[in-house]
């Protein structure tokens, strides 16, 4: 049986070079690529990944494209729940899954990213954390090269579906509950990153609610940063009687600031991460079932791969007050 070592020796290149050629890496000269592929054809070499796919009973291979948040370890919790849900559903659907992080694709063009995924035998992609600035991913979505599902982004076409909760309504629900419980009249709202799609939807929700209830609203951008939310709260919270945050991390930062300032203001968050239960103060938050969202995304990707067209799928959310007893096992 011909091995990758045999190909490298015959072509006079390193094994790593053969691997790069077989996986369509962009930084390989055309001369080297041609030489290696000539040897591959002449020796009849079949890469392990290809051989595995030929003998597999799986019905397709999909990629989970995730964005790491290096500013905090709390983001890992959400990504791990996404991965857990996807792997569980993929097994039921007889789909192979690989995990790819956006940092691995930095500095690649859309054509290069497409070649990379094609070299991995990818038929469908689920995109987590898509922003307005991810132009390469937007180009791939528009190209229709793969069946795709985007989480929490309004991208729908013939080959792409969108899956997520109703962020506008969820923001209304959690803020309305917190405001009503405390009879608040002046709200400080700490929003997320301006490049995020969910930021716009959540902002629409709080603006709609405050306009309807005739509540004074001030919006400050916290960039989903615990530190920045803490600084905003220290600077502005005394002027308001409620702090509404577009994420749990920012709610934690806001609560820490209020404790340091020794003043009380009701605070609510958004996401339902486990860390909220350790804060020591009960806060209302939107509970997203990230496992369920990822399972729905796999179901939707499977539907697209069977020839159906893209659509928007809305997953239910709930409003909870997280406590330590709720998260310990």
Image (spheres, rainbow, N blue to C red):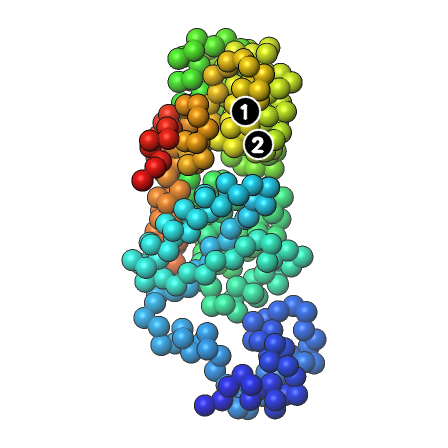
How crowded pointer 2 is (Cα within 10 Å; few <14, some 14-19, many 20+) is rated as many
Number of the front mark, 1 or 2: 1
Q: Which residue is mark 2?
A: 226
Q: Secondary structure at mark 2?
A: helix
- Which residue is situated farthest in the left direction here? 92
Q: Position of residue 142 (x, y in %)?
A: 55, 51
* Residue 94: % across, % down: 32, 62
Q: Is residue 150 visible?
A: no
The vertical placement of 253 against 106, above or below, is above
Residue 247: percent from left, percent from top = 50, 31
Front-most of 314 and 277?
Answer: 277
Which corner quadrant holds the N terminus? bottom left
Q: Residue at x 60, y 57 (%)?
A: 105
- In the rendered structure, the answer to whether residue 176 lies left or right of residue 259 reads left
> Residue 70: x percent and y percent?
59, 45
Task: Give the left or right position of residue 326, taking residue 273 as reference.
Answer: left
Q: Earlier in the sequence, mark 1 or mark 2?
A: 2
The dot on residue 8 is none
List the residue tagged with mark 1.
256
Q: 61 left or right of 4?
A: left
Residue placed most toward the observer, 196 or 242: 242
Based on the displayed image, in which of its 4 quarters is residue 324 positioned? top left
Q: 44 above or below 92?
A: below
Q: CB of mark 1 within 8 Å of CB of mark 2?
A: yes
**Residue in view at x 47 percent, y 64 percent:** 122
Residue shown at the point (64%, 55%) measured from the top left = 106
Residue 253 visible, this angle: yes
Q: Quadrant of residue 188?
A: top right
Q: Residue at x 45, y 44 (%)?
A: 77
Figure quadrant of the C terminus:
top left
């Amino acid at each position: 049986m011909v091995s990758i070592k045999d190909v490298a020796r015959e072509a006079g290149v390193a094994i790593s070079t053969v691997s790069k050629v077989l996986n369509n890496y962009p930084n390989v000269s055309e001369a080297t690529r041609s030489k290696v592929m000539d040897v591959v054809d002449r020796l009849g070499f079949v890469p392990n990944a290809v051989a595995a796919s030929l003998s597999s009973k799986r019905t397709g291979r999909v990629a989970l494209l995730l964005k790491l948040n290096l500013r905090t370890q709390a983001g890992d919790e959400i990504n791990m729940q996404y991965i857990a849900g996807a792997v569980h559903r993929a097994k039921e659907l007889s789909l192979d899954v690989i995990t790819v992080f956006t940092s691995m694709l930095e500095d690649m063009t859309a054509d290069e990213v497409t070649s990379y995924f094609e070299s991995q035998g990818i038929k469908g992609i689920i995109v987590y954390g898509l922003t307005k600035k991810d132009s390469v991913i937007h180009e791939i979505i528009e190209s229709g090269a793969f069946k795709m599902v985007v989480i929490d982004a309004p991208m729908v076409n013939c080959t792409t579906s969108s899956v997520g909760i109703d962020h506008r309504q969820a923001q209304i629900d959690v803020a309305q509950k917190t405001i009503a419980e405390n009879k608040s009249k002046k709200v400080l709202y700490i929003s997320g990153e301006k490049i995020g799609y969910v930021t716009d939807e959540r902002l629409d929700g709080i603006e709609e609610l405050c306009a309807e209830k005739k509540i004074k609203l001030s919006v400050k951008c916290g960039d989903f940063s615990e530190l920045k939310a803490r600084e905003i709260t220290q600077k502005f919270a005394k002027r308001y009687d409620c702090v509404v945050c577009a994420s749990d991390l920012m709610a934690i930062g806001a609560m820490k600031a209020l404790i340091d300032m020794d003043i009380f203001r009701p605070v609510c968050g958004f996401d339902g991460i486990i860390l909220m239960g350790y804060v020591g103060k009960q806060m209302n938050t939107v509970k997203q079932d990230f496992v369920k969202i990822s399972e729905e995304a796999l179901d939707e990707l499977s539907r697209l791969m069977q020839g159906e067209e893209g659509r928007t799928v809305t997953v239910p959310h709930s409003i909870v007050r997280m406590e330590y007893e709720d998260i310990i096992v």
